[in-house]
Image: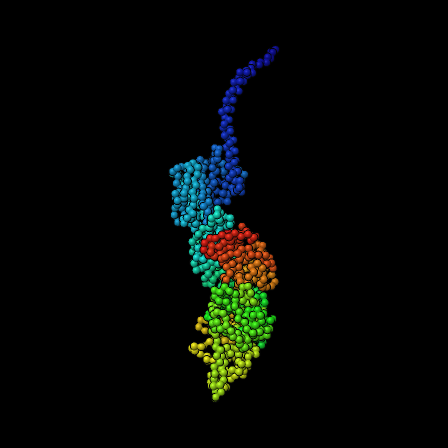
Amino acid sequence: MHKLVKKYKNYSGMTLVEVLTAMLILGIIIVAIFPLITQSLQVTNLSHNISAQLFGEQEEVEIVAITEDGAYLEDGTFIPVAYFPVVANGSINWVPGKTVKKADLVRFLADNQVSSYNLFEVYEGYTSEEATLTIVDKSLTADSELEITDQSNTSFNESELSAVITPGEDITFTLPTNSSRFTNLQSPYIIKVTTGETEKSGMLLVHLPRAVIANDTGGLLVASSPYPGDWFAGGSSNWVSRTSSISSTDDINKIIFAGTSESEARFIAIGKNGSIYSWQDGETVFAKLTSGVSADLNDIISTNYGLLVVGNNGVILQSSDGETWNTRTSGTTADLNAITYNDSTKQYVCAGSNGIILTSANTSSWTKISASSYPATGSTTINSKDTVTFSSSGDYMKTDSNPVTGSSYTVFMVVKPSSTPTNVSFLSLGPASSSFTLRTSGTNLAAETKSAGSTSSFNSTDSNLALSTGAAIIACRVSGTSIGLYKNGTKQTGTIPTSVTPGSAVGMQLGSSPLTNYTNPMPFDGSIAEVMVFNSALSTTRPNWKYWGTTYSLASEMDIVQKYLSVKYNIGIASDINDLRYNGSAATTVSRPYLNSLTTINGDWRTFLVLRWPYGYNSSHPNYTMDPVLWLDIWSSGSKDTLTRDGNKVLEWKNTAFEDLTDASSTIDANFPPKLIANMKSVACSDSTHFYAGGDHRNLILYNGTTVIQDPEILNNSTGKAIQYSIDDMLFDGDRFIALLNDDLGSSNKYIATLDRPGNYTDVKVISSYTLNDIFHYTTGDTLLVTGNNGTIFYADGSAESWTSKTLSGNLLAACLR
């Protein structure tokens, strides 16, 4: 039997020497590879830091691929390398490069150059500080060259740009701030930096300015910021002069901004002569558009429904793009001076001359709103003939210009006071510096005058002709310093201190005298039926006529007119007039009857007078004065005569309209209220149903959601003499109404006044020495800006509590911020 024997191989353990030797070799290997591990960790950490830096603010923007030319975004957009930001190395030795993000995966691509040829952006009117730009580029050398080229291939080198190159670091350059300023029209500008054979490029965009002011010579002032704190930083003005295509004869009335992005940005300006100008991104500075009208354009607004412009002669234009304009039917030929949009009621509201206020929900059809307290017809009659009524609140009417141009003139009026007429004004001619007013002193008829250049108070020439509440024919005849006052034919003569020539610059006023007597306008409460104004002193001579041995007295020109009005309105007249005879055309007592025998008019003015005027109706006669230069006649029954006379503007007051009858073909527009009773120049809506409309001399209209009322007292609280001011512009800033009050007739003070909610008094915030032309509210920055003549600007925050005044240059007509 074989015996199994197990054999073992002799495996010996590592000796101590072997272990030590092995550890020594392992240590050498670890020491050798450890820096590689550390470097890998640093690169990984750097990649994470760069990724976070590049995408920390735009994690939703995914770059899906990068080429040597640029980067592709997830939506297919390609960004040229000149725009793609490259992270520069910092104080430690970062690995330069870019990151690519796809979903949650971020990859890092190394680059061997560090540069920052970003897209640069500035706004026209850029400041010196904004003009300095820097490009980081580690590859720059002392021989690198900078060049910027505009769209006309005009280039600017590094010397012209005051470039400073720091090799291996960056290049800093400054855009021109002189006449070679970079403009939006020449944008974009191409930036090129050449280093050896390498050329890198970037782009500079110059956007439209953020603030624009137009002056009265067609020039502009622009600024790169809409915030007042930037306009005069450092104590100097940062407004820059800019030429434009605006004609010096097309004074700009308003500027607005339209557009939701820089590529769609545009300013639109409107002005005289039907002018509309557009300054669009990359286009001519205010290129003139075709409006299709020649009337002056006065106001423009932009809403979600498009652009709307209003102007003279009832012009309304609408546009959806600012390029093509279509006319809208306003239903009036009155001048439309202002427009706004009430977002609460979804209605447009515009205001204009003749006290007109229109509203519309669709810009196509307009509804007229009338003010009940204005002079109106039908409430009072004289001998069944209509009158125009005036209230004691200061209602008045005025003509476009003064029919009286010399120092001799004659005025006749048929009036009926509602209450005893104590210290009231019936009619005023001329400006405050050289005026004539037919009034009462106490209750007696009087004349008040003030000579040109006079610093004294008004001078009153009184009579003992007392007036009461009954209908009366009143008249005054002025010839140099001689004056005659008449009531129902009874005459009282006197003198005035100096000869007064009212001139034609300021219109004639009826019912009150706010243009000639600021502190005491003497409003008339009652009715006026007829007004006749002659531009000469009518004759008072009563020629003798001898017939069959008997001498008779013939009526003078003054007698004839007073008798005509006496018969027409059945008002008794002085007996000495009734005892006179008419001139007639034949030398018989039948053809020359006593005035007392005439009891009916039997036709119009000329039919009544043609045979009875003292010198006969002959226009070639040197004393031909039969036709008045102004005749206002409310009588609505019977025939009327159209008066024309060689270029003199003759007006007729019929029903509720003044009408220019210089042209015999003129017709009455029955929709007009009396002409110029309240020339509305501004309108503004609150955030409810309320709106205000304001205009000439205390005309302030409030619509409370139901009715339109005149609010003559609301502007009197702080100004003291607000009746002399014209409310030329106003707006609602979200909290209150803010109005510009000018006075072009005497006072040097102009005001920025705030009206709190409807019914509260005004609070004057600013007093200016120069006419204020425009007020603009920049809602984004809650900034208020007012511009005026002589370089005047005021600005404030939206509370309108504290205004800052500065001075630029020129008469500043309109402003806009964006």
The structure residue drawn at horizontal position 54% and vertical position 67%, both measured from the top left corner, is: 513
Expressed as whole percent of the image width and height from the top left, the position of residue 234 reads 48, 46
Q: Quadrant of residue 705?
A: bottom right
The residue at the point 41 percent across, 36 percent down is 167
Residue 464 drawn at (x, y percent): 56, 74
Q: Tell me: 254 left or right of 526.
A: left
Q: How is the image coloured?
A: rainbow
Residue sitting at 51 percent across and 24 percent down? 30
Using the rendered image of the protein, determine whether residue 139 is visible from the camera's viewpoint: no
The answer to which of 347 and 458 lies nearer the viewer is: 458
The furthest residue to the bottom: 548
Is residue 724 positioned above or below 489 on the image? Answer: above
Can the viewer see residue 112?
yes
Give the total number of marks visible in the rendering. 0
Where does residue 342 sit, x and y in percent of width and height? 57, 58
Seen in the picture, residue 224 relative to 115 is either above or below; the reply is below
Front position in the image: 73 or 159 = 159
Residue 475 or residue 389, whichever sits in front: 475
Residue 323: where, in percent of width, then height?
47, 57
The quarter in which the N terminus is drawn is: top right
